[in-house]
Amino acid sequence: MCDHCVSAAGKTGLSRRGLFAAGAGLALAGMLSTPLLAQSATVGPDEALKRLVDGNARYVAGNLNERDFSAGRAARAASQAPFASILSCADSRVAPELAFDRGPGELFVTRVAGNFVNEDVLASLEYGAQVLGSQLILVLGHSNCGAVSATINVVKEQTKLPGHLPSLIRAIRPAVLAAQKEGAADLLKAATIANVRLNVAKLKKATPILSQRIAQKQLAVVGGIYDLATGKVELV
């Protein structure tokens, strides 16, 4: 650091670490004020959803687009411009890029068992929308979800789970209770759908970033259920 910078830091009371932290804060603020790749994020929410629906139809039919994943690798190393973000369950049988027949750099995927919104997931999706220019968020549940099933068991049997598993239960429990209140014949299916819908609603209300972008028609939030047996995604 130059003598002038050291002097300036001393006068303002900023340490070397403080200067670095301030610089990092300004850089992040700049990133959040303007999407890095706004010129690429022009498909719009409706077209983004259509791309996912069409891609899933190809996946179900077994007509996936052939791709050379090495092509464009250098460009992707420099930047990314995903047109959609996915909040998916962490289940190993669910692979969003495959399910929607999309290549690297096209989807911004966050995953957690039970596909629910917490602070970290919300921050990630805000980053995808505001900084990367994602036009759509899809909350993707799936059939026979173990996290939802475990929550049902806890609600019904008062099962005690070890470790940090209760944190998953607390997040999914409102959906199970809502499905129970409806008197659903298939509680697992109903709770899975309710969980998706509750988290879609939560994201739509999330201030300040997501709700503002939705109001400006720069972003849409939808929900879907992936069927493990067929690979088909049904919007809910």
Image: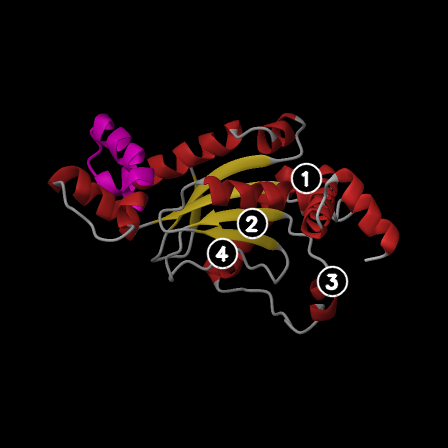
Amino acid type, residue under disc 4 in the picture: Pro
Foreground mark, 3 or 2, reads 3
- Considering every residue shown, the one lying at the far right of the view is 4
**Which class describes the residues within 10 Å of circle 3: few (<14), some (14-19), or many (20+)?**
few
**Is residue 184 found inside the magenta-colored segment of the image?**
yes
**Which class describes the residues within 10 Å of circle 1: few (<14), some (14-19), or many (20+)?**
some
CA distance for labels 3 and 1: 23 Å
Residue at position x 47%, y 40% in the image: 119
Q: Are marks 3 and 2 in contact (CB under 8 Å)?
A: no
* Relative to 74, 203 lies left or right: left
Q: Bounds of the magenta span? A: 168-191
Q: Are marks 1 and 4 in contact (CB under 8 Å)?
A: no
**Which residue is denoted by mark 2 in the rendering?**
52
Residue 144 appears in view: no
**Which residue is denoted by mark 4 in the rendering?**
96
* Quadrant, the C terminus: top left
Of label 3 and label 1, which has the lower sequence position? 1
CA distance for labels 4 and 2: 10 Å
**Which class describes the residues within 10 Å of circle 4: few (<14), some (14-19), or many (20+)?**
many
Amino acid type, residue under disc 2 in the picture: Leu
**Which residue is denoted by mark 3 in the rendering?**
78
Foreground mark, 3 or 4, reads 3
- Residue 216: name its quadrant: top right
